[in-house]
Image: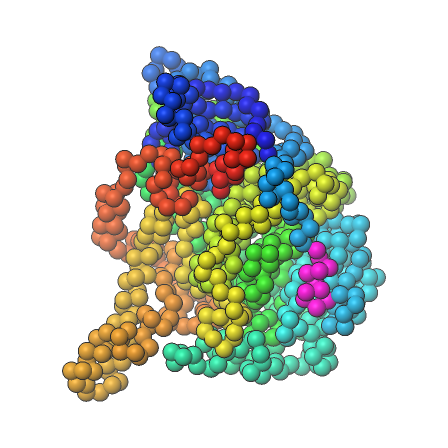
Amino acid sequence: MAAPHLKHTFANIHALRGGKPELGDLALSDYHLVFRFPPESLTAADLSLKKSVKQVWFAFHIISQCTLRPTPPSSGVPSSIRIRFRDFTYVSFNFSDDKEAREAFEFIKARTSKLGSVDKLLAFSYRPPSNAPESKINGWDLYDARAEFRRQGISEKSRDLGWRISTINKDYSFSPTYPALLIVPSKISDITLKYAASYRSRQRIPTLTYRHPVNNCTITRCSQPLPGISFKRNIQDESLVSACFSASTEFAGGASLDTTVESPPPSTVDLTIESENTDGSVSDIQKAEDELTQQNLIVDARPVINSYAMQAIGYGTENMEHYKFAKKEYLNIDNIHVMRESLEKVISAIKDADVSPFPPNKELLAKSKWLKHISGILSGSALIAQRVGIQHSNVLIHCSDGWDRTGQLSALSQLMLDPYYRTLEGFIVLVEKDWLSFGHMFHLRSGHLSHEDWFTVDGDALAGTAVKPGENDGRQDHFENAIAGAKRFWNKKTAPGKDAVTDADGTPIETAVEPAVAENMATRPKDISPVFHQFLDATYQLLRQHPTRFEFNERFLRRLHYHVYSCQYGTFLFNNERQRHEARLQERTRSVWAYFLSRRSEFTNEQYDPTVDDHVRGRERIIFPRCDDVRWWHQLFNRTDDEMNGDLNALAATAERVAAYQQASSSSEFSGPIDAGTSDANSNPSSSGAPSRTSASPTRSPLPPGLAATTAGGSVLIDVESAHEVLTPGTRSPAPLNRNAVAGDPTGTFAALQERISGLSLGKAMFGGGIGGSTGRNSIGGIGSNSGRNSQNELVEQEMKSMD
């Protein structure tokens, strides 16, 4: 990408982040805000400074909130523009001239919220330099649906495994939000599919997304059924779901769905490990295989009350009287509005990162329940992976319209089941298949065309006051408007004769009859939600807990999160495969996967071990999350681990010491009289050679605020099953919620807070090295110290690193 044509330049502007100012020049182009420091006024006087000039690039499209604080010249207080970016970067720019501040604000607003068309986004003008490695890779060719399902054993030329490729949706007329190729049971005809489609919201019928290579069990996905208040049923839908669940058993030998099907014995290759590991402990997978009977599952990701409430407006959930070949599980995962509100509380906890060097507001972080939501998504995904990989069962997943929570659960369960998806190329295929091809609404959920409400003018600043930490700077107004709009929906009725579609428990999506490229692509704040963000966060938790099982590193996930919003590539534009096809994105834009593959070394996990051996602990094919060991993704929020997770880490260390002490005490009770030598050995279990809790098992952390308690010391699978017993009505009473762990130890928390405050690096420069990597708050955009480059190619790489 050539150096942009700069439209406006403002000299001697103070940029503020973490309460530390930096003097430089601010330049605005059509797509970027560029801050260069030191300013030209200083480098012209001192030529030696030119070698140290740095540039930080900010893409306009990732602006989440921009507030102008104008001040009268007589006040002596500079006017400022405070900007919050989607990658959780916070910066304030102070202008000595109020007119310049207003001019810059209006320019940024016009290039962000007044574009009016997707075609005006950066992706349609971005081209990498012709000699750059990225230009030699066509990322659009990486995903081929036929090739992926051929990898899973399904193709026209392979033997029949109970599934076939249907082209009923080849022109997207059958289901506009579904992929062109659908994998359906071999014994179900396209005629049956057409009749079944009328019973599923948005005609998103049950269709295959994953077939296990060993046991032929499957994960299928769809949208909610349409029983309504009259409790309608559809024989074709029931037959389709039954065929989805019987395909694997018929392939295995034709067993009936009405009888209990014995799963393969525990000695089956690639699915089991030895009953005891080298340290003497029984594996989690072996524990789960004690009850190896097939139990097919229909997973409704919604809270049970929401599922039944949808019947009042014509939707609902399956009546299990008509689906007796399966069980129903409700996962109680909240809708998009709750998740948006949760993230807004996290943002409120860190929103003063531009003007304050202090840590986040821990009380607001706890109130957000963000970690509880991530843990719930992981727990539900683990249940699905357990049923498919361990209990050799089939699972059908849906939420409301099957493009939000369904995508999270489907993709994460496959990530746990299949080592291929934990490679760089495999993860890309997973995102392409279960998110892009199956129709996650990236445009609506991300708000790519921005919104005018995100640009506000703070009238209070006219009095001449400076912004201070904790003040209302207008950043919450748009959120309150979105919540009010969502509430108003429940007071409205669907217009007669209109094929309205609801999303996330009742919110209407105005895409019932879509044109080639949807006419109304304007951002609606009530439709925005961090659904894909949560998927990446949950993936980060798995990567953090299993650091040797992933080929890609944390930075890959962070950069992927950035490019969902940057609009620099066409990959995440529009809402479904049909819209992208008809917008000709492959011809007109670049794919983000070329960016990642051309920089493979930057995104490769150095700890990655590709070996899969189900007989060696830590190298099993299947991985499971530790749902009580969820942590804040501090790198994404541009904070340190101590700032975000300090209290949780301290409590985890304490719990570990207590557990070790209890184990040592228990061992001494059963060992009888001991001599001095034995006493010495027991006092230090790690040196005695005997298995100890601290050395044999992974670190277990206290539950994040709001999480339900599970049996201490139990296996992962037992914890997962317990969690779903809590979430599923009719099994047992839910366990009481834990109190805020921080509130339980005020003395220790206060001492920790004192230690953190005393250790703040108040003297470091804002744009300097600071904390290692891109996890620190003293550098914007992740640029290192070697940014003073002048060639065109180096400028482009500099841009990428600022987006890095």
Residue 362 vs 84, above or below: the answer is below
Residue 260 vs 381, above or below: the answer is below
Q: What is the residue that sits farthest to the bottom in this orientation? A: 673
Q: Which residue is drawn at 46% across and 20% down?
A: 10
Q: Where is residue 402 in the image (x, y as percent from the top left)?
A: 64, 55
Q: Give the range drawn in magenta.
A: 144-154
Q: Which of 111 and 601 is in front in this view?
A: 601
Query: Dominant secondary structure of the magenta stretch?
Result: helix
For residue 640, side relative to residue 318 (left or right): left
Q: Residue at x 39, y 47 (%)?
A: 365
Q: Which of 626 and 223 is in front in this view?
A: 626
For residue 708, side relative to residue 572 (left or right): left
Q: Position of residue 27 (x, y in %)?
A: 49, 24
Residue 12 vs 425, above or below: the answer is above
Q: Which of 782 and 460 is in front in this view?
A: 782
Q: In which quarter of the image is the N terminus?
A: top right
Q: What is the residue that sits farthest to the top in this orientation? A: 74
Q: Which of the 4 image quarters holds residue 241?
A: bottom right
Q: Which of the 4 image quarters holds residue 247?
A: bottom right
Q: Where is residue 554 in the image (x, y as percent from the top left)?
A: 47, 52
